[in-house]
Image: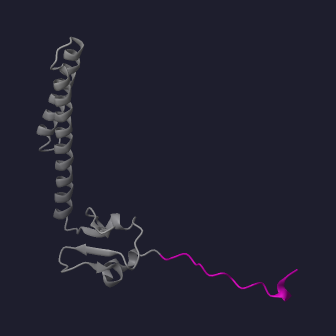
Amino acid sequence: MKKGFGWAWFFIIFGILGAIRGIIMIGSENSYGFHMLSMGFVFVFIGVRIGSSLENKQKEAKYKNSGGKFYYLAERNKTSKPFTLEQLKDKDLTNESLIWTEGMDDWKMLKDIPELSHLVKPKPATSVPPPIPPQYQK
């Protein structure tokens, strides 16, 4: 088990047991059964959130300790989640894509960041070829 995930598992297991207890109580026509069931789901939700939060923090710490950088994109007027250089290669970036990383004062267009300019994928040719000259037609 990864370090720090004990509380996440505690909440998940406690929530599952509470939900089971709630189902049993509903079956016995106890008025608290639905409360137990809903509280069980709340505890499971809390456990999952704690676990995913810890996992993201561990991934980020591992990457930062490796000397890497995180890059943020401006997508639909919102800041994206952090991306590694490898993850940016899978994005459809243009020269006008706005990017920010640690050490920058402000957002910059991709074309203004020399270390990332190779990430722009060439656009497919949209020109139409000229007609075939008559001497080459059969």
**How many circles with numbers are drawn on the protein?**
0
> Residue 82's spot in the image, x, y percent?
25, 63
- 78 and 124: which is toward the camera: 78
- Which residue reaches farthest front? 31
> Residue 19's spot in the image, x, y percent?
20, 25
Magenta portion: prevailing SS class? loop
> Residue 128's spot in the image, x, y percent?
66, 81
**Residue at image coords 21%, 53%:** 56
> Residue 13's spot in the image, x, y percent?
17, 29
Q: Quadrant of residue 109?
A: bottom left
**Residue at image coords 45%, 74%:** 121
**Residue at image coords 22%, 68%:** 68
- 130 and 69: which is toward the camera: 130
Judge left or right: residue 78 versus residue 10.
Answer: right
Residue 89 vertical position relative to residue 59 in the rendered view, above or below: below
What's the magenta region?
122-138
**Residue at image coords 49%, 77%:** 122
Point out the image quarter for the N terminus.
top left
- 31 and 70: which is toward the camera: 31
Q: Quadrant of residue 12?
A: top left
Q: How is the image coloured?
A: one colour
Point out the image quarter for the C terminus.
bottom right
- Which residue reaches farthest right? 138
- 4 and 108: which is toward the camera: 108
Q: Quadrant of residue 91?
A: bottom left
Q: Is residue 133 magenta?
A: yes
Residue 41 vertical position relative to residue 88 in the rendered view, above or below: above
